Image (cartoon, rainbow, N blue to C red):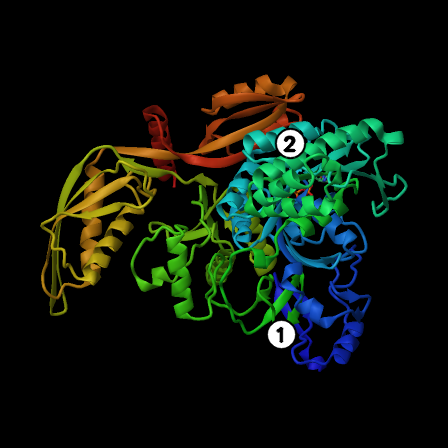
């Protein structure tokens, strides 16, 4: 059966795969003994879940644990809040790894891409599976950087619950809001972990308040911290009224004591905890009728008599209903508070059967992920997360269904639930489920292969990368024939460039990074056009008359209307040809060659000579729209970014002065301990390379977050500067 051991490459890395289809247990045991799993340098891995040493505890439980005991969860947060460090601790305490990985040393399990290890950030979501106290946890560590927001969204869609990690000294930060909104959209129950309680400036109270105010969530305080900053030594479990103190001598944080709070030794703490527990009980009773009946009936006289399990069950229900979020705290880096977080994950987050998924999928090969290692399995029960291979035409965001009819049924349901804006009526469109929302790229640049002969290799690499990451767009410049990369930010494009080199062995050259502008028009214009061409013995003749005007509401693609005189029963093929013509004309505006948006086009007349091909109809409509656009008063739209800068008070003035020069608008300046939080807008074109400038201005003490707000009209002066710069560039070229 050793022939079943195969090599399978992911990210160009050879990884051993164990195929256990139809294999007797004894054989598997023997193979596992011989099999040396791929171990990233410097790490010491323990066995896979369910496997003790090299032995199999229960093969059945590895593959198909009872569904009630499964937790599919994600870890999400603002960049640098400590998701990866928390995940590392989780893997260590669960026995998945035998040594603690460190983001700063670049040897974590989930950040396994070379770029992640070098930069100390998460770029791609990684899935790992481990067991904790009889529960199977499938965990996904998602990126925090705004450039990789699509990666977060595609994970949230399939998760049953999430842990939101916060930096306790910063509370809710810009990207936390974005991921929180995404989790709201996909209705994912959450628990909050206030990490970095050991950090100077950490404040449990401040972080909880920011959850209440900024996320508009109701925090359920399940713990209180024992000390803050350097004095942080553990947590108080409010539900059980116990204190959990980590042994200072224990380097890996495995050793901690759980002791009931006593009147004799902890009078003040016991009083505080009792008050917090009573408040928690009242809060949960307000949100859960079943619990309210119980509390008001049996325990109204003395909440102390209420058993912890009753309260925990009610907290589970409230978490599932998403009417409140449990809050825990700790310090992943100092190895404190992670084991209770694991308990909370299994106790409060839902199992897949408590969530409402009704999709059935059937696939030929299934693999269980363990970060960058995989094990092949014969089958999987509903509610698990697994990998499959060989789907050549499937891209991120697609939903795989067992048959066309089940896909259609699911699509209809998704439509009913309003999760998808129904765009067209074609069957292909209806087969698409509510996919991930792909944000529009705001940056682009040219990319060149080392030689013309390598262009097909580059095309192939880009095709593969796009399937993995739909937020990456690739197009051809029709004038220069160059390949253009469009991405979410400077870092995104840099990482793609780097991956092409490392994973596909291609040294490519990037042109200067440019902002993706848009164009629109300011007045109503009319145009007519006739195309009369004879090809072979066939005459193609079309005459079009149309009107283009600014649309009242924002719309990325042009709104098409047919005037009454244009026949309602226009053949479907002709309608599609008209739409194609309009779309292709609007891809390149007359000012900068940028896409046109916020316009409505009315087709007043269309005369088609019999036998005219649809290609000619498209060409004529496209030319006519372009003619109209050229006549109109035109306006450049530029991407406007939400900006949040966190800066120590001493450096506030130079940061504000610099932002004023960047056409920035300041909305608000908040105070967070000794830091100032500057919130405002700034045009994307003015903020390129900002990290270096900010570092210099503040001696590296400030951080910032950017997110696309909307596209706004440039003022006439800035627009003419941009246009003359562009035309100057064109002349130089
Ligand atoms: N003081 C302190 N620092 C921490 C703690 N947890 C993480 N850090 C540090 O914070 C930095 C960011 O940690 P990561 O675990 O990479 O954070 P992340 O949220 O995964 O970051 P991205 O993946 O880039 O979004 C690293 O330098 C960690 O050592 C903590 O509990 N206390």
The disc placed on residue 639 is none
Of the image marks 1 and 2, the number of the one nearer the N terminus: 2
Residue that appears at 67% across and 32% down = 279
Give the left or right position of residue 534, taking residue 172 as reference. left
Mark 1: secondary structure: loop
- Closest to the observer: 439 or 335? 335
Residue 175 location in percent, x, y?
A: 56, 38
Residue that appears at 59% across and 43% down = 144
- Closest to the observer: 614 or 102? 102
Give the left or right position of residue 559, taking residue 316 as reference. left
Residue 667 location in percent, x, y?
A: 48, 22
Vertical relation: 644 (above or below) 54? above
Give the left or right position of residue 13, taking residue 640 as reference. right
- Cβ–Cβ under 8 Å for marks 1 and 2: no
- What's the distance in space between the residues labelled 1 and 2, CA to CA? 45 Å
The disc placed on residue 208 is 2
Query: Which residue is identified by label 1?
Result: 378
Vertical relation: 426 (above or below) 586? below
Residue that appears at 61% across and 63% down = 10
Quadrant that contains the N terminus: bottom right
Instruction: Judge whether residue 728 can be spotted in this image.
Output: no
Quarter residue 49 falls in: bottom right
Q: Residues within 10 Å of mark 1 (few under 14, many from 20)?
A: some
Residue 616 location in percent, x, y?
A: 19, 59
- Closest to the observer: 467 or 166? 166
Quadrant that contains the C terminus: top left
Q: Residues within 10 Å of mark 2 (few under 14, many from 20)?
A: many
Residue 694 location in percent, x, y?
A: 59, 28
């Amino acid at each position: 059966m050793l022939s079943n051991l195969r090599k399978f490459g992911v990210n160009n890395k050879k990884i051993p795969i164990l195929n256990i289809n139809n294999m007797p247990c004894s054989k598997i045991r023997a193979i596992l003994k011989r099999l040396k799993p791929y171990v990233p340098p410097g790490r010491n891995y323990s066995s896979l879940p369910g496997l003790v040493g090299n032995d199999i505890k229960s093969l059945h439980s590895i593959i198909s644990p009872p569904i009630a005991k499964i937790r599919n969860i994600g870890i999400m947060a603002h960049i640098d809040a400590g998701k990866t460090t928390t995940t590392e601790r989780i893997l260590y305490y669960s026995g998945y790894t035998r040594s603690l990985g460190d983001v700063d040393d670049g040897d974590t399990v989930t950040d396994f891409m070379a770029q992640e290890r070098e930069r100390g950030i998460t770029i791609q979501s990684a899935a790992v599976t481990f067991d904790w106290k009889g529960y199977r946890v499938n965990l996904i560590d998602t990126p925090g950087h705004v450039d990789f927001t699509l990666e977060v969204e595609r994970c949230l869609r399939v998760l049953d619950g999430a842990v939101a990690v916060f930096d306790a000294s910063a509370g809710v930060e810009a990207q936390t809001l974005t991921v929180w909104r995404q989790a709201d959209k996909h209705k994912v129950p959450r628990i909050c972990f206030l990490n970095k309680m050991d950090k100077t400036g950490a404040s449990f109270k401040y972080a909880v308040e920011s959850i209440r105010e900024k996320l508009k969530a109701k925090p359920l305080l399940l713990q209180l911290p024992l000390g803050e900053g350097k004095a942080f030594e553990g947590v108080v479990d409010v539900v059980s009224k116990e204190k959990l103190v980590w042994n200072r001598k224990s380097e890996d944080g495995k050793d901690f004591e759980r002791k009931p709070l006593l009147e004799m030794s902890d009078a003040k703490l016991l009083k505080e905890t009792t008050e917090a527990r009573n408040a928690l009980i009242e809060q949960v009773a307000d949100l859960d009728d079943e619990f309210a009946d119980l509390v008001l009936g049996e325990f109204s006289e003395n909440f102390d008599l209420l058993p912890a399990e009753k309260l925990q069950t009610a907290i589970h229900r409230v978490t599932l209903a998403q009417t409140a979020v449990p809050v825990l705290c700790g310090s992943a880096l100092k190895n404190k508070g992670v084991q209770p977080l694991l308990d909370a994950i299994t106790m409060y987050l839902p199992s897949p059967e408590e969530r409402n998924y009704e999709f059935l999928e059937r696939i030929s090969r299934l693999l269980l992920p363990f970060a960058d290692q995989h094990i092949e399995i014969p089958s999987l029960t509903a509610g698990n997360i697994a990998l499959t291979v060989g789907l050549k035409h499937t891209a991120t965001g697609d939903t795989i269904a067992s048959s066309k009819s089940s896909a259609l049924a699911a699509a209809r349901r998704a439509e009913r639930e309003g999760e998808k804006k129904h765009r067209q009526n074609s069957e292909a469109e209806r087969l698409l489920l509510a996919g991930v929302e792909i944000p529009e790229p705001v940056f682009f640049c040219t990319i060149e292969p080392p030689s013309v002969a390598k262009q097909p290799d580059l095309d192939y690499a880009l095709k593969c990368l796009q399937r993995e990451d739909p937020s990456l767009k690739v197009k051809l410049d029709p004038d220069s024939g160059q390949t253009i990369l469009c991405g979410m930010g400077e870092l995104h494009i840099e990482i793609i460039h780097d991956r092409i080199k490392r994973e596909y062995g291609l040294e490519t050259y990037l042109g200067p990074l440019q902002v993706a502008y848009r164009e629109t028009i300011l007045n109503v214009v009319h145009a007519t056009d006739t195309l009369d061409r004879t090809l072979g013995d066939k005459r193609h003749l079309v005459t079009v008359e149309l009107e283009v005007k600014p649309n009242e509401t924002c719309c990325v693609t042009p709104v098409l209307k047919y005037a009454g005189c244009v026949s309602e029963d226009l053949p479907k093929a002709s309608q599609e040809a008209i739409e194609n013509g309009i779309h292709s004309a609007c891809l390149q505006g007359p000012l900068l060659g940028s896409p046109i948006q916020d316009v409505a086009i009315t087709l007043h007349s269309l005369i088609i000579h019999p036998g005219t091909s649809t290609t000619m109809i498209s060409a004529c409509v496209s030319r006519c729209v372009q003619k109209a656009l050229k006549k109109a008063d035109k306006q450049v739209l530029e991407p406007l970014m939400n900006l949040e800068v966190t800066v120590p008070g001493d450096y506030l003035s130079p940061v504000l002065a610099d932002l004023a020069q960047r056409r920035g608008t300041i909305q608000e300046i908040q105070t967070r301990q000794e830091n100032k939080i500057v919130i405002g807008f700034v045009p994307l074109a003015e903020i390129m390379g900002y990290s270096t400038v900010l570092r210099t201005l503040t001696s590296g003490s400030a951080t910032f977050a950017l997110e696309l707000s909307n596209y706004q009209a440039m003022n006439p002066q800035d627009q003419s500067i941009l246009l003359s710069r562009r035309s100057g560039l064109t002349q130089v070229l």
